[in-house]
Amino acid sequence: MVKLSVIIPTFNREDVLLRAVKGVLTQSFQDYEIIIVDDGSTDETKKILAPVLDRVRYVYQENKGISGARNRGIQAANGELIAFLDSDDEWQWKDKLLEQVKIFDTHRDVGLCYGQLRIIDSKGEPSDIKPRVACGKNFQEMITIGADFPTSTVVVRKECLEKVGLFDVSLRVLEDFDLWLRIARFYEVYGLTDQTFGLYHEGKKSEGREMVVYDSTARLYQKILDNYDDIPRNIVKTRLLTNRYLLAKSYYNKRDYAKALCLMSQIVFGHPLVGLIFTDDSDNFLTKTLKFTKPFVLLGVLLLKFIFSRFNRSQKSNLKVASL
């Protein structure tokens, strides 16, 4: 039996995986196991692990996404504490685990402990710290603030996961925030922010990534509205509607007018006052009016674009038939 299990999910990261593993092996705290969950890699992931296979447990599965890989690691873990580390991030502070274990040993009410990472941008340059501000120590504070701390800094009690469940595989992003909120319903959250733990590598953003973020964020906040009563509903609803609106605009920019129109119709007819999310107390009457009408204007434009696109498609179809 070990005190702590370090779970590293990976997918085609042969170029950086050993860097992450070495950051664990140099930790001053040594009562741990490392579980690497290979989520269906097609590169040389297992081959490059050869020098450290005696120090890690290697688990292979067909590709299920990062949540599915983390969940597999949790199910295989023997530790009473679970630490998460993404394979493209790295721990550089050698006392990272030692100090977090101390928090759990001295604070029985704490179920989750997080810290900070230095962000490295796609050019390899340091750009910021994540998180920049405290993210809250309980459920209410985390929702209000919109807690955004890196998964690669988090350690949780395994008993928390047995109580609240694992990562939601239906969420492609913010699956971590969803789990942290569920833990914070029953346990305190501790931010250990006096020392930066290591590096968070952003990498290049894939095409269409923004749409995935908008969609998953909206799904998460809808899930929160559906499952919790004691929440700041106005804040949650504003974030939900904002992300649905941004998703509709993204469909519009991609000229997918049918999806954009369907989404905007749901927004406007389901929430006629949606325009209020764009207004600010400092706005004058005219500015507020213009901002308030933005969703209605977009809905009207989408309706026209949709009608014209269908008309043009019909005309082209008729021309093809006539040419035959």
Image (cartoon, grey):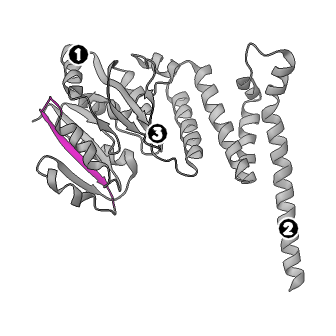
Q: Residues within 10 Å of mark 1 (few under 14, many from 20)?
A: few
Indicate left or right for 102 with 196 as reference. Answer: left
- The image position of residue 7, as x and y in percent, is 26, 41
Camera-near label (3 vs 1) is 3
Q: Which residue is mark 2?
A: 314
Task: Mark 2 and mark 1 in contact? Answer it, CB < 8 Å.
Answer: no
Q: Which residue is mark 1?
A: 108
Circle 3: residue type: Asp
Task: Mark 3 and mark 1 in contact? Answer it, CB < 8 Å.
Answer: no
Which is nearer the N-term, disc 3 or disc 1? 1
Q: Is residue 19 above or below residue 323?
A: above
Could you say whether the residue bearing mark 2 is in a helix, strand or loop?
helix
- The image position of residue 319, as x and y in percent, is 88, 76
Residue stretch rendered in magenta on the structure: 27-41
Camera-near label (2 vs 3) is 3
Residue at image coords 58%, 25%:
236
Residue 151 shown in magenta: no
- The image position of residue 97, as x and y in percent, is 21, 28
Circle 2: residue type: Ser
- Front residue (pair 130, 221): 130
Q: Which residue is mark 3?
A: 121
Cα separation, mark 2 vs mark 1, equals 67 Å
